[in-house]
Amino acid sequence: MLFSGAMTALVTPFKNNALDEEAYRNFIEFQITEGIHGLVPCGTTGESATLSHEEHERVIEICIDQAKGRVPVLAGAGSNNTIEAIRLTRFAKKAGADGALLITPYYNKPTQEGLFQHYKAIAEAVDMPLVPYNVPGRTGCNLLPETLARLAKAFPNIVGVKEATGDMAQGSKTLSSCPQGFSVLSGDDFTALPLMALGGHGIISVTSNLVPGRMAAMVNAFRKGDVAGAARIHHELFPLHEAMFFESNPIPAKTALHLMGKMEAELRLPLCAIGTAAKEKLTAVLRQVKLI
């Protein structure tokens, strides 16, 4: 299974409103050295919505080049415009990504049939591993298990899902509906361990931006049958999981990485600097878990 374990939804470092390539390469190296199982550039956490097309492509190119095949790269390539999603996915394949992460079309509010036709069009246009990303809280639509199962059975290159509903009932239905070998990845750090207990295959994580080694260790412990050890790490990291959403993601993550000395805290509007109260709470958590 190509996409499994602990994969990081990478933040995108900026400096003076431009991509900070040096910080990004160093950050990717930090992730790999710490033992992360995979990298996901240009997702929501990477502020993909405010990257230009040229920046989007460059971020993916840098990630692939820096990873050098040591871990899989699942490149964000989604859009609420199917034609645009196909273009981005074709670029991801050409650049050498191992797969493409495709968010459900936001704002449009497609029907289940519309979602099926969207992913069908991409799957037929680009022969590479594809992973739909289901996050109704951000997109306004929910890719239901029966629609996902229909896609997985019809198109062998639709190989997994990032399941970020936070709904264990839906996660369970997805796992029981989709074919064997289909990778169901949690999109919410706090559900990673529960979803793996139901048969899930890992996590595309925000928290692992800060602690890639600890997130990988939790998954590794679970895989070895050390459920108690995995649960211990889950509880240890839970304050961080909560802290990553004191304000809209990736504001807390990028602020924390700045406090850790990894990059500037710069964000793209309409995201802005963290509020004073939230920063105080975040700083307290980072001190609690000994990251600063």
Image (cartoon, rainbow, N blue to C red):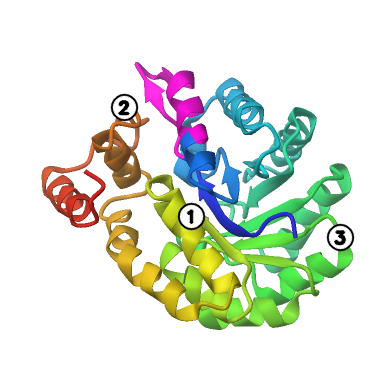
**Depth check, front residue: 94 or 31:** 31
Residue 58 percent location from the top left of the image: 60, 23
Q: Look at the image and tell me in which quarter the C terminus lies.
A: top left
Q: Do the residues under discs 1 and 3 have CB atoms within 8 angstroms?
A: no
Q: Amino acid at mark 1?
A: Ser
* Location of residue 43 by image quarter: top right
Q: Earlier in the sequence, mark 1 or mark 2?
A: 1
| Residue 31 to residue 199: above or below | above
Q: Amino acid at mark 2?
A: Glu
Residue 173 percent location from the top left of the image: 64, 82
Residue at image point 79% right, 47% down: 122
Q: Do the residues under discs 1 and 2 have CB atoms within 8 angstroms?
A: no
Q: Work out how far the residue at label 1 is from the one at label 2, CA to CA, in angstroms.
A: 20 Å
* Location of residue 116 by image quarter: bottom right
Which residue has dot 1 on it? 205
Disc on res. 264: 2
Q: Look at the image and tell me in which quarter the N terminus lies.
A: bottom right
- Few, some or many C-alpha atoms within 10 Å of disc 2 (few <14, some 14-19, many ≥20)? some
- Few, some or many C-alpha atoms within 10 Å of disc 3 (few <14, some 14-19, many ≥20)? some
